Image: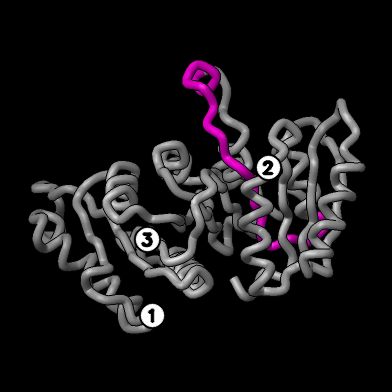
Amino acid sequence: MQAVRSILVVLDPEHAHSRALTRAKLIAGVTGARLHLLMCDRKHDHSALLSLLGSQLHDDGYDNVTHEQTWHETLHESIIAVQQAEGCELVIKDHRPDNPLKKALLTPTDWKLLRQCPCAVLMVKNERPWTGGVILAAVDVGNEDEDHRRLHASIIDHGYAIAGLAKGELHVISAHPSPMLASADPVYQLSETIEQRYREACQRFQAEYGIAPECLHVKEGPADVIIPEIEQEYDAVVTVIGTVARTGITGALIGNTAEVVLDSLQGDVLVLKSEEAAAHLAELARG
């Protein structure tokens, strides 16, 4: 989080009170990051509101604030175009769930943003303060290639930074698969040995970040089920989750765990990209 020097805050023309702006102020207050306020609307002029918000932020001590209104074909394309032009390392946006019928017919805008935005995206789901809360970092330590290892480190690092920012407690979760009797590797034939392997893979995070054993959760089951269960059990205020680019597919598609849990999680969701995915998406955005 300390490396974030520029934050893109997406404001919703239909909701005057922005939860995204509240979170952006919290982060910028600690990191000193620039805030770039964005209103995406092709029908109405919001320049007066943007100017007012900018003035209020300046009065509150945020000296580096800029703003704009724009529209490029779709909402997610508008956001990504501005993120690239402004060089923002973090996009913060309110998330309001689509109704089930609309979701069945159309890919939700926020899913498209998570899939295609090259930088980290924080989806703000409620107004609850982060202060003193549990921060949940979700890692898939079953994947141990170099790109995944760097992504895991980034997820834990961001979770640790947010916990420090909010004076909260960092918890780490990793969901592991059920036993497979047909597996060639005997480790994956028993739940106990699978869990042990996952716990051992998490030990370096425990050592580096001082994560207590009771704050490490290794559970059997699908990640999109286990993550919301742990989030609700510990009443987590933020869940940090990641994605790696899939080779062989046009565009870097997010693993659907983040998309599925987006609506089922109660707290905010920070989605990080692997370095490979971020570079590929930035190239697509420039093209």
Q: What amino acid is found at the position of numbered circle 2 in the picture?
A: His
Does the magenta portion include 275? no
Residue 118 visible in the shown view: no
Work out whether residue 100 or residue 61 is closer to the camera in this orientation and state it.
Answer: 61
Q: Whole-percent x and y of residue 106?
A: 57, 22
Work out whether residue 64 or residue 217 is closer to the camera in this orientation and state it.
Answer: 64
Work out whether residue 57 or residue 136 is closer to the camera in this orientation and state it.
Answer: 57
Q: Which residue is mark 2?
A: 17
Identify the residue at image location x=46%, y=72%. Answer: 167
Q: Which residue is mark 1?
A: 209
Identify the residue at image location x=33%, y=45%. Answer: 228
Q: What amino acid is found at the position of numbered circle 3 in the picture?
A: Val
Of the numbered discs 3 and 1, the one sitting upstream in the chain is 3
Q: Which residue is mark 3?
A: 139
User: Helix, strand, or loop for circle 3?
Assistant: loop
- Which marked residue is nearer to the observer: mark 3 or mark 1? 1
Of the numbered discs 2 and 1, the one sitting upstream in the chain is 2
State if disc 1 and disc 2 touch (CB < 8 Å).
no
Above or below, 72 relative to 142: above
Above or below, 77 relative to 231: above
- The range drawn in magenta is 85-104
Identify the residue at image location x=42%, y=69%. Answer: 168
